[in-house]
Each structure stands twice: as C-alpha cells, then as structure tokens.
Amino acid sequence: MKGQPKVAFIGTGGTISSLGRDPLDILDYTATDRRLDAGGIVAAVPDLARVAEIVPVPFRAVTSPAIGFAEWRDLVLLCERVAGEHPDLAGIVIGHGTATLEETAYALSLTLTVDLPVVLVGSQRPMSALSTDAGLNLVAAVRTAAAPASRGRGVLVVLNDEIQAAREVTKTSVTRLQTFRTPDFGVLGHVDGDSVRYYRRTERAHAPGTPFDIRALPALPRVDIAYAYADADGTAVRAFRAAGARGLVAAGLAPGMVPPAEADALEEAAGAGLIVVMSTRAGSGIVPLSTRLRERGILTADNLTPQKARILLSLALTVTQDRATVADLFATY
C-alpha cells in the first residue's frame, strides 16, 4: 500500500521456512527437507502486505545448525548491499532457525555496518503446522523493524510478541513457544497488535561502529568451549589446544569454577598464550573476576553465555592478542 514503510526480508531457512508432512507434523518436519525461500515465506503470509512493503531478498535456505561464520559474513555483506540499493528502507528482518538464532543475532550485533533496525525472527512450529507461530512472529518482526523507536537499539530478536536484545536473549526450551528469554533482565518491549512498545534499553555497545570488520575475513580464529562437569580432567582443553585453538571459553560450574584438573589445564593453556575466558553453564548471572581466576590468567565473560562468549572472543582475536585489551572488549560488548 502507498505510504507504507519498506522492510527487507532475508530468509535463511529454519523452522519458519519449513514444510512438514501434514498440519500435525510439528516435531519431525525437517525429514521432508522442504523449505520456502524468502519470496515463498512472504507469499505464505499475505497479510504482511497490510503492514509494510516487503522486499524479499534471496539467500540460501538451510537448517540453523548449518549456519556459522560464513553465513554471518555473507549476511553482513548482504545487509550492506540491500541498504545501499534501497535508501528508503526502514529496516531488515532475517528469518532464521531457532537452534542458533541467538548466536547469529549476537554475531551480527557486533559486525553489521548498516545503521538500520535489524530483527531476527524464527518460529517453533513449521509454516505448514496447525497453529503455526511463523506468520504472526513474522508480522511482529516486520512491525518492529519498521518502527522508528527500534533505531539505535542494536540487533533485535522477536518471537512470541516479545522484543529481546541480541546480546542477552537465549533459547530456553526445545518446543515451547515462549522459548526465547532474557533470564537476567527481561524483554526490551512487546509487540501488541500494531503497537511496538519499548520499556528499556541494553547498555552494552553494538554495531555499527565496532572494531570488528569481518567482510573480507576467510574465517575467524578458532575458539572452543570446554564444558565443565564433575570429574572433568582437562582432556577436552588439551584436545582443543592440539586442534589449534587460539582461545578457549570454559562453560564453568556456577559461579565460574571448574574441577581442579580442568583448572590446571586451563591455567596451562593461558600460560601458553591462549586467551581463556570463564563463563558458566548456569545460563544466567555474572562470573566474577575472582582472585583464583586472576592468578591463573583467566578472564571473565561477564554474563555472556558460553556460546556468545565464544563469538566475542573469536572477534576480539581478529583485532588484538593482548589479554587486557580482550578484557576491555568483554566489558564493552
């Protein structure tokens, strides 16, 4: 309709694009290997035309476990290109599978070059399912991307009528519709009908204007995650070092501790020049920089989950090898 905001939609695949065997197939739908591209998703939700002028943007449609650095880099370049081709663009929505949605959102929040609202959206039920959440989630995401109040807030995640910050949100349930949560701080706002309402901001820095430029990078420095558990003895840490890791994230026991043999292996890694960062497997809360961590040369991930700490550490290693500078980046982003 004339006078509507223009929003680009990039479809990367995932549940929001998937077609199952029948309307009751809400769990094993990936077995069909059928996915709609961006144009097909937009066509499947014709009421989007009442909300905005949608520009479908082609991208490869894959399951989200197959998405990683190469896709993040290509999405950064694609968003840059689309924004250049459409100077009147109000925002960009990216459809994504929920398994790694939070990681893509955080990676983009650190690396995008466009000064537009970018919203990631997914669904818990496939497009073909009875009572799918795909259509309404997409409408809410488009409304959020088009809202003037969304500018300057970094990358956003919208599902289940809730607006979350990319840095803070995490998936908390396998199948429930309310799976995406921000445990420590809660939502940024809500999408109720045609109203987009915000109630707080995230305070950490975000793109554009970060020091992380991945547009020409072939790969990120290798960073692995060592998951802590009772009797963990450092085997994984030593294997990651042997595989060429340049940094390690420990998914520690709350409040940021690991078994003694694991701690020794992490200290050895830090002493050998690797940047080691302590997160927690708890899913929320700040890991304090304790005396023991400091003495072992281990940094703290603040309240980042292990998977997001890995992303920030990988990006940090593209600009510095200095432990103190990396610590500053974790305090900033």
Image (spheres, rainbow, N blue to C red):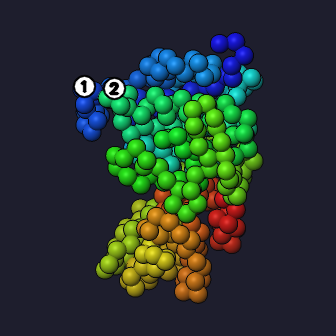
Taking the view exactly as shown, the residue that stands out farthest to the top is 2
Q: Nearer the viewer, residue 32 or 164?
A: 164
Quadrant, the C terminus: bottom right
Disc assigned to residue 86: none
Q: Position of residue 257 (x, y in %)?
A: 46, 79
Image point 67% across, 46% down: which residue? 198
| Mark positioned earlier in the residue sequence (1 or 2) | 1
Q: Are marks 1 and 2 in contact (CB under 8 Å)?
A: yes
Q: CA distance from mark 1 to mark 2?
A: 7 Å
**Residue 253 drawn above or below residue 214:** below
Image point 37% across, 52% down: which residue? 173
Q: Nearer the viewer, residue 129 or 264?
A: 129
Quadrant, the N terminus: top right
Is there any visible trace of residue 67 in the rendered image?
Answer: no
> Toward which corner of the image does residue 281 lie, by quadrant?
bottom left
- Using residue 109 as the reference point, say whether residue 28 is left or right of it: left
Amino acid type of disc 1?
A: Asp
Amino acid type of disc 2?
A: Ser
Image point 52% across, 19% down: which residue? 47
- Assign a secondary structure to mark 1: loop
Crowd around label 2: few <14 · some 14–19 · many ≥20 (10 Å): many
Q: Nearer the viewer, residue 174 or 67?
A: 174
Q: Position of residue 206 (x, y in %)?
A: 69, 51
Crowd around label 1: few <14 · some 14–19 · many ≥20 (10 Å): few
- Using residue 141 as the reference point, say whether residue 33 is left or right of it: left
> Which residue, given by chain and number where applicable, does mark 2 sit on?
128
Q: Position of residue 250 (x, y in %)?
A: 46, 70
Image point 49% across, 77% down: which residue? 255
> Which residue, given by chain and number where applicable, does mark 1 sit on?
22
